[in-house]
Amino acid sequence: MAARIFVSILKISPKFKKAVWKRIYQFLASKYQTEDWTFMNYGFQSLNKSERIELKKEDETNRFFIQLYNYVASKVDLKNKRILEVGSGRGGGADYVDRYFQPSKMFGVDYSRNAIEFCNKVFKDSKVEYKLGDAENLPFENESLDVVINVESSHCYANVSAFFAEVNRVLKSGGYFSFADFRDKEPFEDLKKDLANSGLEIVKSTNISKEVLRALDDFNEEKMKRFGKMFGSWLKKPLSEFAGMKGSSIYEDLSNGNTLYYYYLLRKN
Ligand SMILES: C[S@@+](CC[C@H](N)C(=O)[O-])C[C@H]1O[C@@H](n2cnc3c(N)ncnc32)[C@H](O)[C@@H]1O
């Protein structure tokens, strides 16, 4: 109930929504410096169990989150390309893409200063460059990147069209935008219009709600254990909502189709 009220308040003003999300991510990155917590997405699990990606032993603990990154990153060839992740959070995704896909340069941008400081500490030996920046005003030159990826971040933005315009600006001609996120049914219609008007060509769109839900199911028990260790009881309940635990609003809405989780691949012509 509290989560639903909170979500309704966020719908009132896009700028307010953006500021509230920033507070939340700033707080999480400063208060919880747990170095092995480096992903913040709902995860992905193929419905075909035989489709299992090979991971190094040390990455197994983040398998479900990595599988979402793998889905987004494997749709285009990243080798020797300049890649930007917008909304890189606690940095695990950009680090994974850099280690497994061999780009020539990998950047991670996030508007949470604390998250960037966390990444620069935890991934100090990584080649990834983590930079402070806003999705709606990217700190990159025109036509300077080959691929932009974006994982479960755009729902926080005040103006998603401004973000798409920025992606269009920073991509080289022939570059790709690989994007995954969720929306409730009605805002999803707006998202589709914004994508159609982005100036980028839609190459592929796939509803991955079932795969995300499968990951939430398969990881639920382990997530509960990790939350139990990390968070005090006052935070456990609201964070369980945001983390999509079984019984949370987001879990129910993904199950009943009120919320859709989509993957899009777009190309700058
Ligand atoms: C749910 S987390 C996902 C993080 C990461 N992509 C992952 O999957 O682990 C959303 C991230 O988007 C970032 N974010 C939200 N709004 C942003 C904006 N306007 N510009 C840049 N980053 C933003 C947040 O700070 C947060 O780190």
Image (tube, rainbow, N blue to C red):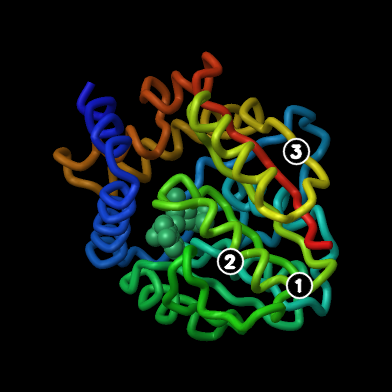
Quadrant housing the N terminus: top left
Q: Name the residue under label 3.
A: 205
Residue type indicated by callout 2 = Glu
In the displayed structure, does residue 199 sit left or right of residue 40?
Answer: right
The residue indicated by pointer 2 is 166
State how far apart marks 3 and 1 are (Cα).
20 Å
Determine which of the numbered discs, if any, sits on residue 93 in the image: none
Mark 1 or 2, nearer chain start: 1
Which label belongs to residue 146? 1
Please provide percent x and percent y for residue 150. 59, 56
Quadrant of ligand 1: it is bottom left
SS at mark 3 in the image: strand
Left or right, 81 with reference to 3 = right
Q: Is mark 2 on a helix, strand or loop?
A: helix
Tell me which label, 3 or 1, sits earlier in the chain: 1
Q: Residue at x 59, y 33 (%)?
A: 261
Which residue occupies the extreme left position in the image?
234
Is residue 37 at all visible to an observer of this figure? no
- For badge 3, the amino acid type reads Ser
- Classify residue 245 by image quadrant: top left
Taking the spot 36% from the left edge, 25% from the top edge, the residue there is 248
Circle 1 residues within 10 Å: few <14, some 14–19, many ≥20: many
Q: Foreground mark, 1 or 2?
A: 2
Location of residue 171 in the rendering, given as x and y in whole percent from the top left corner:
71, 71
Question: Number of callouts in the render?
Answer: 3
Q: Which residue is drawn at 76% across and 52% down?
A: 266
In this view, the residue in front, 249 or 235, is 249
Residue situated furthest top in the rendering: 256
